[in-house]
Image (tube, helix red, strand yellow):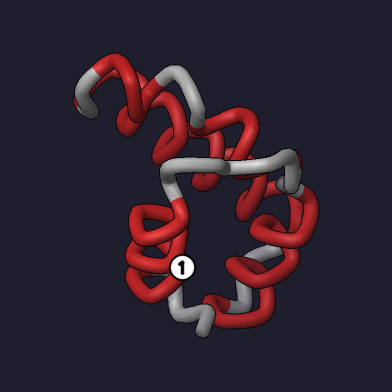
Amino acid sequence: MDELIKLVSQKTGLSEEMSKQAVEVVVRYLKENLPEPIAGRIDDVLSGKGVAGLGDLAQGLGGILGQK
């Protein structure tokens, strides 16, 4: 998640603390609103753990977040 926080900070010009708060809000929102099989894996994706079966989703989320 640290990498995502740094990316948000770089792209927005927000401090790392503000970026951390923004990322936490978005992650909480995703966990509450995505279907359970996906929501339950968000922490795995953010921590860099394996995302077997979620490769396309992870790539899609990376695209949304400006990563390729």
Asked where in the image residue 35 lies, by quadrant, the reply is top left
Viewer-nearest residue: 66 or 38: 38
- Amino acid type, label 1: Gly
**Residue at 68% across / 56% down in the picture?**
5
Residue 55 lies, with reference to residue 22, above or below; the image says: below
Q: How many numbered marks, from 0 up?
A: 1
**Residue at 59% across / 67% down in the picture?**
8
Circle 1 sits on which residue?
62
Viewed as shown, does residue 55 lie left or right of 9?
A: left
Viewer-nearest residue: 51 or 34: 51
Residue 32 lies, with reference to residue 17, above or below; the image says: above
**Residue 14, position in %: x, y?**
62, 67
**Residue at 62% across / 54% down in the picture?**
19
Give the crowd class for mark 1: few <14, some 14-19, many >=20 residues within 10 Å.
Answer: few
Q: Secondary structure at mark 1?
A: helix
**Residue at 38% across / 75% down in the picture?**
63
Asked where in the image residue 60 lies, by quadrant, the reply is bottom left
Viewed as shown, does residue 6 lie left or right of 42?
A: right
Viewer-nearest residue: 18 or 34: 34
**Residue 17, position in %: x, y?**
73, 47
**Residue 44, position in %: x, y?**
64, 32
Viewer-nearest residue: 64 or 37: 37
Residue 29 lies, with reference to residue 52, above or below; the image says: above
**Residue 48, position in %: x, y?**
74, 47
